[in-house]
Structures are given as C-alpha cells and as structure tokens.
Amino acid sequence: MNKNRTLVVGDIHSGLQALKQVLDKAAITEHDTLIFLGDYIDGWSEAVETIDYLLELKKKYNCIYLRGNHDELCYEWLTGNADNPTWFMHGGEATSNSYAKVSEKTKEIHIGFYESLVNYHLDSENRLYLHAGFTNLKGIEHEYFQKTFYWDRTLWELALSLNKDLEEEHIHYPKRLKNYSEIYIGHTPVTRIGKTTPQKAANVWNIDTGAAFKGPLTIFNVESKEYWQSEPVYTFYPNEKGRN
C-alpha cells in the first residue's frame, strides 16, 4: 500500500455526513494529500458544519482546498453583496439558512476560509487539479479570466467529444489537453451522462458524482485509480430536497 497517496475529493455540497463516511472508507492518514475540488456548500443543510469540519481537518491532514463556483457565490453573499436569486435556486437558500444560525465571528472565520481557497493545483507529476476548467490553449498560467477556473464547462465537453481513436500526436488533438499528464475536475456532475462513478474522457477525470442530487460523494486515488464512495448523499438527509 502506498503510504503517500494523493486523494481527490469530489464536490461535497454540504453533505457532511457523506464526507465523514467516505473519508472513513478511504482510511485517510497523515501521509496522504487530500485535494478537494471545491463546491463545499450549497445543496444540503450542513453548510456551516461542513466548513467547520474542513477547517479542523486541515489541522491534522495535508489538505488543499480549491475554489468552486458555489464557494465564490457564498463568499460574495457573506461579504455584503445583494442576494442572488439564481444562487438561492441552486442551493444557496439552504446555505443562507445555515448561516442564519451562527455568530458574526463564525462568519468572519468562514470568510477567511473562502478567501484562502486556490484556483488550481499542479503537482510534481504535472497533474492539474481545478474545479471546472480553463480555455487558454497554452494552459492555466495564460488564462485571462480567473473565474474560468471555477465556472468553465467547455474543458469537460471537449474531452467528452473527442473521438477515442484520436491519438495525442494527431494534428487535430486539442492543444489544451496536451499541457498536463492528467486533469482532475468536478463542477459538472457525471450524473448528466447517466453515471455515478468517476469518469475519464481523454486525460480528464471528472470526480463530481452528483452528491448535490441523487449521487454519492467520491474520493479518488490518482496513483492507483481506486476510489471510495459514500451512500447516496440524499439518504443522509431524508427530509430535504437538496438541489433539483
């Protein structure tokens, strides 16, 4: 067993009970690096509790927290921007209800957490991790709009659209994908293509297995390609709707 695993955690969407279960299944240790792909909140009712848990987790384990679009939306709301009706419709209402129960001090601590999130992580094996995608053919360092890292869906759409017989050396192979050995993303649930397990297209792995909806939460070992999944997250919250 590799004692120095790199483990990628898919979109949580406030599914704290599922997160605890799948971390236990993966038997995480202090030797592991845990890379969280973002979207920690917006979906189920435990938004505040999820962020509290992640803050504590980082004290014991090597955690890298990436920025998701929902995290940015929550941050904007917490720092005084006007209510966003679209955000409320897509999980924000559950998050706002969760924050209505806490002190201003807790909100300040969480604002610090959201500010500390990073847009991407590139490891020593040239594996790229980010919430959504990028569009610049030359790679992440040349991306003009920072929001692309946590909003883009075209990277996954591009990977899905590739002819499986198209070799990387082919003149028409997308230059965007050649920059990295592997790319790990969340953001677009694989449930949209009828799946509930991590999916690979070209060299892109999508680890969002639909925790905000009817799917499980997933942890993925990038070296061995082994993965662990919680029970479907909605089963932990039987009286809630999650995101529709």
Image (cartoon, grey):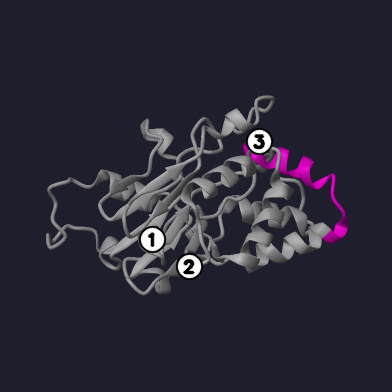
The quadrant where residue 141 appears: bottom left
Q: Give the residue at x 56% y 60%.
A: 67
Q: Residue 151 or 215: which is nearer the viewer?
A: 215
Residue 209 is a magenta residue:
no
Residue 213 position, x and y percent, is 54, 33
Q: Main secondary structure of the magenta part?
A: helix
Q: Earlier in the sequence, mark 2 or mark 1?
A: 2
Q: Nearer the viewer, mark 2 or mark 1?
A: 2
> Where does label 3 land, which residue?
89
Q: Which residue is mark 2?
A: 31
Q: State the image coordinates of residue 49 (x, y, percent, origin top left).
A: 72, 48
SS at badge 2? loop
Q: Which mark is residue 15?
A: none
Q: Disc 1 residue type?
A: Thr
* Disc on the earlier residue, 1 or 3: 3
Mark 1–mark 3 Cα distance, whole angstroms, equals 27 Å
Going by the image, does 71 lie left or right of 209?
right
- The dot on residue 135 is 1
* Residue at mark 2 to residue at mark 1: CA–CA distance: 34 Å
* Cα separation between marks 2 and 3: 39 Å
Q: Is residue 220 above or below residue 181?
A: above
Quadrant in which the C terminus is drawn: top right
Q: How many marks?
A: 3
> Which residues are the magenta region?
90-105
Q: In the figure, residue 176 lies in which quadrant?
A: bottom left
Looking at the image, residue 215 lies above or below residue 140: above
Q: Earlier in the sequence, mark 2 or mark 3?
A: 2
Image vertical order of residue 98 relative to residue 222, above or below = above
